[in-house]
Amino acid sequence: MNPSSSTRGQIERTLSQRIQSLYRSQLEHTPSRVICQIFDGKIAIILEDSITQPEQVLVNNGQQELAEQVRSELDEALQPQLKALIEEVVGISVIDLLSNAKLDTGRSATIAILAESPQFRNP
């Protein structure tokens, strides 16, 4: 994909679809919704219903701390693949990924800091 010949919306949709596919292939879990928004040299990624069944079982059995640790380890394990996916789609190096999850709401968020602001075609 050539980002400079695509619109912002096309890149955001492609990222959303590819990230959802990454979760499905790596965790055998599909978030109900993946929202990507590009602004300046950053990408905000919000996942709805991102908590896996094993994490939910831990939460339901009063093991919140263990579930949080599992989520943290999963996020860390996926970071190299997520970084590569973003760089491939946007065509710009990712210099940092910041992630957090709320087990009680099932949402997780990642901010990707890019080396520079992407260029897009105007719609």
Image: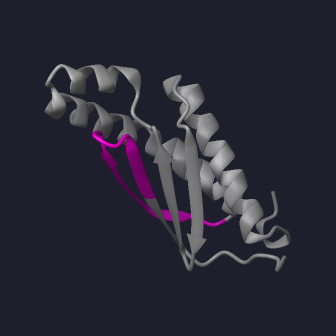
Residue 110 lies left or right of residue 28; in this view the side is left
Horizontal and vertical percent position of residue 39? 57, 75
Where, quadrant-wise, is the C terminus in this rendering?
Answer: bottom right
Horizontal and vertical percent position of residue 24? 58, 29
At horizontal 79% and vertical 70% (from top left) the residue drawn is: 7
Horizontal and vertical percent position of residue 119? 72, 78
Q: Is residue 102 magenta?
A: yes
**Most frequent secondary structure within the magenta stretch:** strand
- 94 or 19, nearer to the observer: 19
Task: State how the image is colored.
Answer: one colour
- As displayed, is residue 111 above or below residue 66? below
Number of on-image labels? 0
Horizontal and vertical percent position of residue 77? 40, 36
- Range of magenta residues: 92-110
Residue 97 lies left or right of residue 72; in this view the side is right
Where, quadrant-wise, is the N terminus in this rendering?
Answer: bottom right
User: Residue 55's image quarter?
Assistant: top left
Q: Is residue 22 magenta?
A: no
- As displayed, is residue 34 above or below residue 111? above
- 46 or 76, nearer to the observer: 46
At horizontal 68% and vertical 62% (from top left) the residue drawn is: 90
User: Residue 58's image quarter?
Assistant: top left
Residue 92 lies left or right of residue 122; in this view the side is left
At horizontal 29% and vertical 39% (from top left) the residue drawn is: 103
Residue 69 lies left or right of residue 33; in this view the side is left
